[in-house]
Image (cartoon, rainbow, N blue to C red):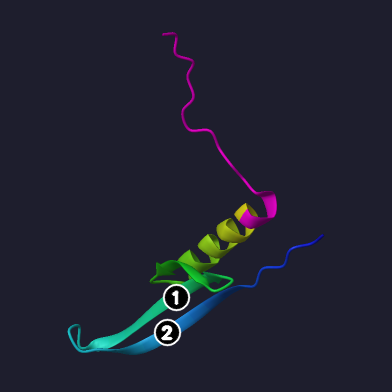
Amino acid sequence: MKTYMKFKIEKETRWDVSKMDIVTKYFVWAGSQCLALVNTEEEALVIYDKIKASYIKGETVVILEEDIEF
């Protein structure tokens, strides 16, 4: 059985009163969860690819493992 997930990048541009400038933010979504918020499109694309790959591969990395004798 296949599982489907929708991935997307949203771009939000608005006026920031505190900075007195237009600010653009990029939201990276997997399904209904926003998993990342970044300030540039390049960052958004990199994170998008990493998030999508982790869902496809189901990537798990062992960070620390040890046998303890007691």
Q: Nearer the viewer, residue 67 or 61?
A: 67
Q: Which residue is rendered at x = 46% and y = 28% of the image?
A: 64
Amino acid identity at mark 2: Glu
- Label ID, residue 13: none
Going 62% across and 60% down the picture, which residue do you hit?
52
Horizontal relation, residue 54 to residue 63: left or right: right
Q: 17 or 6: nearer the eye?
A: 6
Mark with earlier residue (1, 2)? 2
Residue 20 vertical position relative to residue 35 in the rendered view, above or below:
below
Q: Residue 26 appears at what percent x and percent y?
A: 44, 75
Q: Quadrant of residue 15?
A: bottom left
- Please state if 56 lies on the left or on the right of 12 as rendered: right
Most frequent secondary structure within the magenta stretch: loop
Helix, strand or loop status at disc 1:
strand
Which region shows up in magenta? 55-70
Residue type pointed to by label 1: Tyr
Left or right: where does residue 24 sit relative to residue 15?
right
Q: Is residue 63 above or below residue 24?
A: above
Q: Residues within 10 Å of mark 1 (few under 14, many from 20)?
A: many
Q: Residue at the top extreme?
A: 70
Residue wearing tag 2: 12
Comparing 26 with 42, the one in front is 26
Q: Are marks 1 and 2 in contact (CB under 8 Å)?
A: yes
C-alpha span from label 1 to label 2: 6 Å
According to the image, label 1 marks what residue? 26
Q: Secondary structure at mark 2?
A: strand
Query: How many numbered dots are placed on residues in this image?
Result: 2
**Vertical order, 33 against 59 (above or below):** below
Q: How far from the left and from the top, in percent, is residue 50?
A: 57, 56
Which quadrant of the rendered structure holds the N terminus?
bottom right
Report x, y in % for residue 6. Answer: 65, 72
- Which residue occupies 54% across, 75% down? 9
